[in-house]
Image (tube, coloured by chain):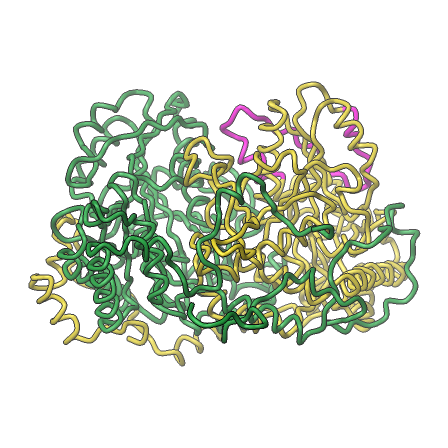
Amino acid sequence: MSGQPTLSGNRGLQIEEKLIFEMDNPGSVAVDLPEPGPIDLDRMGGVARRGRIGLPDLSEPQVVRHFTRLSQKNYGIDSGFYPLGSCTMKHNPRLSEKMARLPGLADLHPLQPQKTVQGALEVIDSLAFWLKELTGLPAIAMSPAAGAHGEWCGLMAIRAAHEDRGEGHRRRMLVPESAHGTNPASAAMCGFTVDPIPAKDNGRVDLDAMKAKLGPDVAGLMLTNPNTCGLFESEIIEIAAAIHGAGGYFYCDGANFNAIVGRVRVADLGIDCMHINLHKTFSTPHGGGGPGAGPTVLSAALAPYAPVPYVVHGPQGLELVEGAREGAKPFGRVKGFHGQFGVFVRALAYIASMGADGLRQASGDAVLNANYLQASLSDALTASFDGPCMHEALFDDRFLKDTGVTTLDFAKALIDEGYHPMTMYFPLVVHGALLMEPTETESRETLDQFIAVVKGLAGRAKAGAAEDFKAAPRLTPRRRLDETLAARAPVLRWKAST
Amino acid sequence: MRYLPLTESDRRAMLDVIGAKDVDELFRDVPAAARLAEALPLPRHQGEMEVERAFTRMAHKNLSAGCAPFFIGAGVYRHHIPASLDQLLLRGEFLTAYTPYQPEVSQGTLQALFQFQTQVAMITGMDVANASMYDGATAAAEAAIMACRVTKRNRVILSGTLHPHYVETTETSLRYTEMTAEALPPDPLGFEDLLGRIDAATACVVVQNPGFFGGVKDLRPLAAACHGAGALLVVMVAEPTSLGLFDSPGAMGADIVVAEGQSLGIGMNFGGPGLGLFATRDKFVRQMPGRLAGQTVDVDGKRGWVLTLSTREQHIRREKATSNICTNSGLCALAFSIHLTLLGETGYARLAELNHAAAVRLEGKLKAVKGLRVLAGSYYNEFAVHLGDDVDAAQVVDALADRGILGGVPASRFWPSWPELRPVLILAATETNTEADMDSLVSALKEVLS
């Protein structure tokens, strides 16, 4: 920044904001509560709190201003283009927020008598219907709370199915090297060992290498499709046949479902189960890290092992099954209550808005936007693979060779240009990866501006402006942060003495 | 379609740049047999008005808590949420941001998480808290797993005071591992003997306080017994407003504190999303699951925040990670933190007092119901009652619902095959309950039980 530093440390709309603990004004209140009257110590089990907790006292205007200022230090989809690969950062419709706040849906307790919550069960059942139709799979576990949780749920069903058949010795799970880190981590939590399978030069699973790994101890295969390189696994039907032939199940990581919704049903690919990130494909907000939801669709073979609870159509209307019942062999329960209901409402509102035609149009536009980026940037950057991509375009850092600029520097320079960076250094199978997922909710104008900026930056990098890249970002509330210091001497909370 | 900016002429022009005839050509890697030629035969897109109409219709099929005297708890509690909270939560920069992996454009989320972690550590009496888990149930399971990792032992004891969903979730999580969960029977009277079960193979005891049936205990003797045997004490707090009134689990000797944070800032939402709180001692921080925000400085020396200690996490460690968790409950953590900030020290303590006072008042009024006895000698804002030997609490709750009253949860909903729990009803009262609500419940109970 040029010019003198300001007296306040603020810079126009960028306002420095202390921690709430540093603003404590004892005696201030932001919530007016009635007098409780004298407290009956008889009922407190002898453990009434002595002493202060240390929470700060503030008034409502101070609290509102504090969090408003914090929000201004963030970049959201509402702020601008967010081409974060593998994350499907699409527009979050506000109608969905409005529907989730209807008192008849929001102000419901999960343990009310079921006859008083038929509308809520209808929400769950309707969403389950759509997700089963869109995937072609006959059953679904609605309760997983996020993608990784859904992965674990699907793998638990696989493990339970093997155990039930007396094949509990099947403990080896095949996972491609390009998989999300959650895949091997989820497999480990089900007692599986992870056996990596390599990719071919064209970015797809090496079918022969995979076949060579099959054996009587193989439990299944976890595959992301479209994969983390943004490519459709063109041999997927052969892959499915191979794993089934060896007695294993085929798990699909559904993180990239947005590319194929309404165009491909995963059941037709031979997949046995797949989690669906409602916070990606079905547009519920990421909220700075969650909450999400990861309903997991299941094939007929895995359906009996679905965890509780689930909704069935009974003689009295919709019924929530919370325990074991005839014919079912649930592997257990994955979380409290009945799933991420508030997220379900939002996802269903989005689906109802889009309809079957809109969902198909959305996946088409998502793939079109990604291919437009890939085609428009392939001169300036280096695309990792030939041919059309699906919903995300993958580049590597060959275009930065000998410039002294790294993928990280390039991403940080984009921040100064007003963009959220793309995903960097993932997938691990290409060098210095830059993974861009534009989604269908970006206009051509936005993409054209972004393309011009990326080309311009690539030109500057090649022209020898490494120092400028190393110094980026310059215009953010904070510049590059010392992550090594943070990890070496962790300060994970405020303390009165500091 | 209102969420799709591309027009037909955009699409045409873009296909020309790509050099493709149509969009279908971009899907040529998909095996032809698996390609759908057209949209599925399902409802088509709708405008806002139509969608609102359909959702309003579904909402009207429910009896919402605001329309009934309401006394349900058992892991989800109805509290008043200050109006400013939701307005802040809806700010697009919070709502529509991703996980703060790019700290320069995420200082808002990161500072908020750092403050959240501090608040959670303070109220639980622990050194450090993470940036959230999915909910109380999964936090309990993760705590059990972490305790096994820390102690290098495999036996987990689950108290009969623990919420049955937390028990089931923990059992499920350990099901296909080396670890084993030993769940004690439900303990409505607070009689269980945990001390006698701790042995040299025990990794941890997981206990809930206030317990699922309402009882509040001094956990110091249990903590001493755990530590004497080299085991950890994991304390679950299902109702975090209670910590405004009681000694913290940390002060009583807990090694890991987990909680369901729904009570603060997050509505009931039919049970999800919730908010898992997870706190522990400094010495165990590298064994923790989940994300952590930490303080650091930028290149100009200014204080800022980043996600840190990520070498514990799945995106770095893969199958050796402390957990597979990635997406957590970020926005719920923000809601929790905003609510606690609005309350402050003064409001948090007062809210807890109001809740306890409401429950004491309800207990007093229930004395008028013949045959009913309160089971817990101590409690916060919730207690179990016994309705009489021949009474089926589920039928009572059903009859109350017919009278427009949401009158608690029958224990048989969780333990359908335990006859001795058939007459047990769990009732909660919070600051939202009026005198009139309580009088309605009492007179309806008299009527139903007569």
Instruction: Say which residue appears at 23% left-offset and 47% top-offset.
Output: A397
Quadrant of the image occupied by residue B266:
bottom right
Q: Colour of chain B?
A: yellow
What span is colored magenta in the figure? B167-196
Give the number of callouts: 0
Quarter occupied by the N terminus of chain A: bottom left
- Whether residue A51 sits left or right of residue B259 in the image: it is right
Q: Is residue B193 above or below residue A108?
A: above
**Farthest front residue?**
A4
Instruction: Say which residue appears at 28% left-offset and 53% top-offset.
Output: A466
Instruction: Say which residue appears at 49% left-offset and 56% top-offset.
Output: B300
Closer to the camera, B100 or B198?
Answer: B100
**Farthest bottom residue?**
B49
- Chain letter corresponding to the colour green: A
x, y percent for residue B216: 81, 46
Residue B450 visible to an observer of this rendering: no
Closer to the camera, A461 or B18?
Answer: A461
x, y percent for residue A11: 50, 72
Closer to the camera, A235 or A357?
Answer: A235
Residue B146 included in the magenta stretch of the image: no
x, y percent for residue A321: 53, 49
- Whether residue B96 sits left or right of residue A180 in the image: it is right
Residue B178 included in the magenta stretch of the image: yes
Closer to the camera, B380 or A429?
Answer: A429
Residue A219 visible to an observer of this rendering: yes
Quadrant of the image occupied by residue B395:
bottom right
